Amino acid sequence: MKTLIIEDEKAALRNLKAVINEVSAGLEIIGETDSIVDTIEWFQTHPMPELVFMDIHLADGSAFEVFEHVEVKCPIIFTTAYDEYALRAFHVNSIAYLLKPINRNDLQNALDKLETLCGTAGGQTPPFDIMKVMHELKKEESYKTHFLVPAKGDKLIPISVNDILFFYISDGIVKAVDRHADAYIFSQSLDELVELLNPRDFFRVNRQYLIAKKAITDVSLWFNGRLVINLKVPVPEKIIVSKAKVSEFKDWF
């Protein structure tokens, strides 16, 4: 199977080629590129390969830009360093991928998955909507990962979203509480924070609380089909999920 490798890290390229030699003698590497520009030129001047290994992060941008200039008609196995958002997008869209550093088991599994996908597609290239994948990646990357919040005096300090357990509003003031139970005042409203944060990680339980999934210790049944959420950092009042939101909360969690 004539194979093109798109990879800009020399160590990663050497590793992939070594693993390919171990796993499959049927893969013949006919080309190597290390940038978007080189890859586009390669496709424009060579016959279509039978398989492509494509690193999604290249020195001159995202490899997805290649698809804006070239119609790739062969199967693709994407390679990436750990990227939660990319892996989620690949999984949702049934795309074969390899997670660096690549080992022989990973490669064999990716080849098996590709074979399965090709089988369900009647032996053709597994169909996927690359624009949909790109949209999902860009959307995920747009969510806030840090906030600058006021500290003592005239300073602002950075707070990582990963450290925040929940947001709440009290007396018209929005605060965030971190895993150390420290509270920080935020200028954004809870409605604004809902738009800025990844909905997979945070849920607007009620008008007062916006909580992170990792903050929940357990959930108790409450009257009239409602739920009470118990957090790792205790709060003075019960955090109640209304009956109307119970189903949505369970789906989110």
Image (cartoon, rainbow, N blue to C red):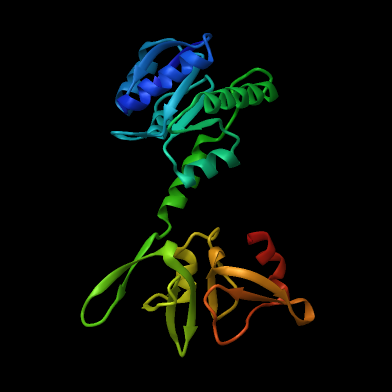
Q: Residue 249's image quarter?
A: bottom right
**Residue at coordinates 43% horizontally, 27% vertically from top-left?**
54
View extreme (left): residue: 154
Residue in the image at 55% along x and 58% along y: 200
The answer to whether residue 23 shows anywhere in this view is yes
Residue at 43% x, 35% y: name it: 80
Task: Tell me the quadrant of the picture where the C terminus can be found.
Answer: bottom right
Taking 217 as reference, is 103 left or right? left
Q: Is residue 16 above or below residue 82?
A: above
Where is residue 117 drawn, in percent x and y?
64, 26
Q: Find residue 127 and report its horizontal and vertical position in percent.
A: 60, 28
Numbered-mark total: 0
Quarter location, residue 178: bottom left
> As rendered, which of 95 and 79 lies closer to the eye?
79
Q: Is residue 91 above or below residue 176?
A: above
Pinpoint residue 44: horizontal percent, then vertical percent: 37, 16
Q: Nearer the viewer, residue 69 or 109?
A: 109
Residue 7 in view here: no
**Residue found at the very far right of the displayed protein:** 224
Task: List x then y, in percent, for residue 137.
Answer: 46, 45
Image position of 41 (left or right of 227): left
Which residue sits at x=65%, y=70%?
218
